[in-house]
Amino acid sequence: MWRIGTIYPLTGPLAKNGIKNFDSVKIATQMINDAGGVLGKKVVLVSADAPDPQAAASEANRLITNEKITTIIGT
């Protein structure tokens, strides 16, 4: 399994665009998994909410430190 962190504004004033972007990533992930994954392994998203820059930095740190995520995508 490949675990990829995602950081998008899912709450707050930028949530409308953040949710649309995250939905697109979820669709792409599902398409990849339906086609057999990456090198035969499924992709799993570990999501984080980042309504502001401070929250984004905190969530990135949490994903790296607590979740042991090595790849993060998002805003």
Image (spheres, rainbow, N blue to C red):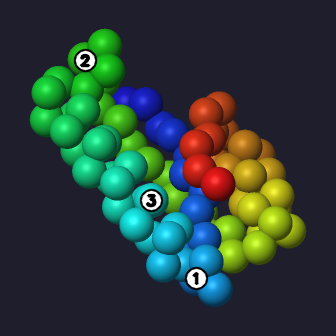
Precedes in sequence: disc 2 or disc 1 = 1
Asked if the residue at tag 3 contacts the one at tag 2, i.e. Cβ–Cβ closer than 8 Å, the answer is no
- Amino acid beneath label 3: Asn
Which residue is disc 2 drawn over?
40
Which residue is disc 1 drawn over?
11
Residue 20 in the image: state x and y as whole percent: 40, 66
Picture layout, residue 21 above or below residue 36? below
Nearest to the observer: residue 70 or residue 11: 11
Residue 55 in the image: state x and y as whole percent: 78, 69
Give the residue at x 69% y 76%: 51
Instruction: Nearest to the eye among marks 3 and 1: give it.
Output: 3
Residue 3 in the image: state x and y as whole percent: 48, 38
For the residue labelled by badge 2, is the local secondary structure a helix, a strand or a loop? loop
Instruction: Nearest to the eye among marks 2 and 3: give it.
Output: 3
Give the residue at x 31% y 42%: 29
Snapshot quadrant of residue 34: top left
Q: CA distance from mark 2 to mark 3?
A: 26 Å
Picture layout, residue 73 above or below residue 6? above
Picture layout, residue 21 above or below residue 40? below
Asked if residue 2 shows in the view, the reply is yes
Q: CA distance from mark 2 to mark 1?
A: 34 Å
